[in-house]
Image: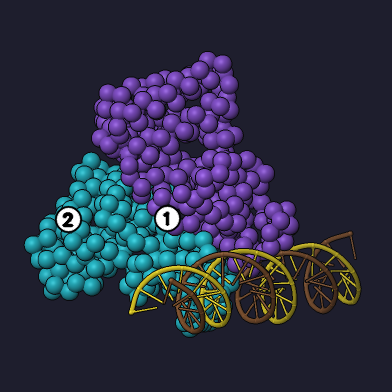
Chain colours: A purple, B cyan, C yellow, D brown
DNA sequence: AAACAAAATTCTGTATGCAGCATACTTGTG
DNA sequence: CACAAGTATGCTGCATACAGAATTTTGTTT
């Protein structure tokens, strides 16, 4: 309905909401979040509103709003009068977060077994097979991305928005650490074995088994990343 | 160490951080959050930056920063070009959130059995006994507050910061609904029975039992509040 | 009278300016 | 030479100003 002419970038109209346009706010939030995850802004770094604003090409006002948003997400900390600092996670913080994440993913797996359609499970299987190809080639980055996608997919298949939401927040806090916590070959093999069992349990819709594997998988993740903290 | 003279309002120095002063930002966030929970700002209400700012006695800049913060917490929604709106939760949203909350509290109970000191458990027992007095008197508001305090205390006793954090976010979203979802006497009695079992399980450090009760308690909460949505 | 179009008003989004606090530097003193 | 006090700079926090989008109101036409 919006435009018949081919080649136009995107429709301005969305099915459910009225108009959906990308906002500067979202762009800044996403950009700074990426800078933190990719280590461009190391933990403990004090964020200079003037410099960072010039770097991103925005003025201080929308930047400050974005920073407040990231504070709420737990990626930044705020010292009154001293501005925002990239949050430094202690080993205990990470361990605690992984315990919660394991529990949340366990719940997600349980719900996914109940609510996912067969077609959706097949899509996860495809992601899994693709990931295994990357593992055979020892191609770490695509493996890493597909791995994340599979976990996100299981969360999505729980069909529980609240669960997805809190998982995302916690996941974002740890992304940086999982990014650098690249394990040795033997532990990698262990993670792959976990994933094999995951997909099997999901296809069998064995809620208890899937839940258990996901929870245990997260506990092993701790062993893999603890050295990096 | 800070001041020997009695009567001074508060020490300016905290044990761990350097200086702790209340910030305008935090005050605005807390105020608007309360206005939402207490229904002064009903779900669906469009927040007018000019009016709200005048009402609170602050200019638009810090107000907007606070609103962005609350958007991240999930209490507000943002329509680009149209400002912030108090988020409207569907019945499914609430149900989903309660499922997650039940799981989180179950985990918290499990961890609390492991990590809480005897003294801390005794404090929870005192809260519980006090709450029971209020129940005998059918004094709803203090009962409600003490109830919340007990749940918060169990979360705190888990000694897991990440768990407390995500629980708080989810809890804040539902506070308004639990505030209005005041049940009849028979369901109230059921909730009280749950609490009796909770405190017993905690004192026995029976992790499985406490976890089960907390999870079930949250599922019953759904029955109590569903009519209010 | 109803529907559409255009103008005016109002509100959001962004930039800039200013005041106060924090920090770094400099200078004076023991 | 070390340390402390005073000064100077720079940054944050907040307010205001301006531009563009959204909404409402008004006028015109059918």
Along the line of sight, the residue nearer the viewer: A206 or A149: A149
Q: Quadrant of residue C18?
A: bottom right
Instruction: Using the image, tell me which numbered label, if any, was put on residue A17.
Output: 1
Q: Quadrant of residue B199?
A: bottom left
Whole-angstrom CA distance, mark 1 to mark 2, is: 31 Å
Can residue B51 be seen here? The reply is yes
Q: Position of residue B144 (x, y in %)?
A: 24, 67
Q: Position of residue A91 (x, y in %)?
A: 52, 42
Please give the name of the residue rendered at 50% of the width and 29% of the height, measured from the top-left corner. Answer: A146
Q: Give the structural element (helix, strand or loop) at label 2.
A: helix
- Which residue was labeled with disc 2? B223
Along the line of sight, the residue nearer the viewer: C2 or A102: C2
Task: Specify the quadrant that holds the C terminus of chain B.
Answer: bottom left
Above or below, comparing residue A221 to residue B52 in the picture: above
Task: Identify the chain of the residue marked 1, using the numbered disc in the image.
Answer: A
Instruction: Using the image, tell me which numbered label, if any, was put on residue A140.
Output: none
The crowd level at tag 1 (other Cα within 10 Å; few <14, some 14-19, many 20+) is few
Instruction: Describe residue C21's horizontal placement relative to residue B17 as left or right.
Output: right
């Amino acid at each position: 309905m919006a435009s018949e002419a081919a080649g136009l970038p995107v429709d301005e109209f969305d099915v459910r909401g009225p108009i959906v346009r990308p906002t500067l706010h979202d762009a800044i939030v996403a950009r700074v979040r990426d800078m933190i995850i990719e280590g461009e802004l190391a933990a403990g770094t004090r964020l200079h509103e003037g410099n960072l604003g010039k770097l991103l090409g925005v003025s201080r006002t929308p930047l400050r709003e974005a920073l407040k948003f990231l504070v709420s997400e737990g990626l930044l900390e705020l010292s009154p009068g001293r501005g925002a600092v990239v949050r430094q996670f202690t080993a205990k913080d990470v361990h605690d977060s992984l315990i919660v994440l394991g529990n949340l993913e366990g719940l997600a797996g349980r719900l996914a077994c109940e609510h996912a359609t067969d077609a959706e499970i097949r899509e996860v299987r495809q992601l899994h097979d693709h990931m295994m190809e990357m593992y055979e080639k020892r191609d770490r980055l695509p493996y890493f991305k597909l791995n994340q996608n599979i976990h996100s997919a299981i969360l999505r298949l729980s069909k529980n928005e609240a669960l997805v939401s809190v998982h995302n927040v916690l996941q974002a806090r740890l992304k940086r650490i999982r990014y650098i916590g690249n394990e040795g070959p033997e532990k990698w093999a262990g993670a792959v074995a976990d994933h094999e069992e995951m997909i099997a349990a999901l296809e069998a819709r064995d809620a208890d088994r899937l839940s258990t594997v996901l929870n245990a998988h997260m506990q092993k993740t701790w062993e893999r990343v603890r050295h990096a903290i």
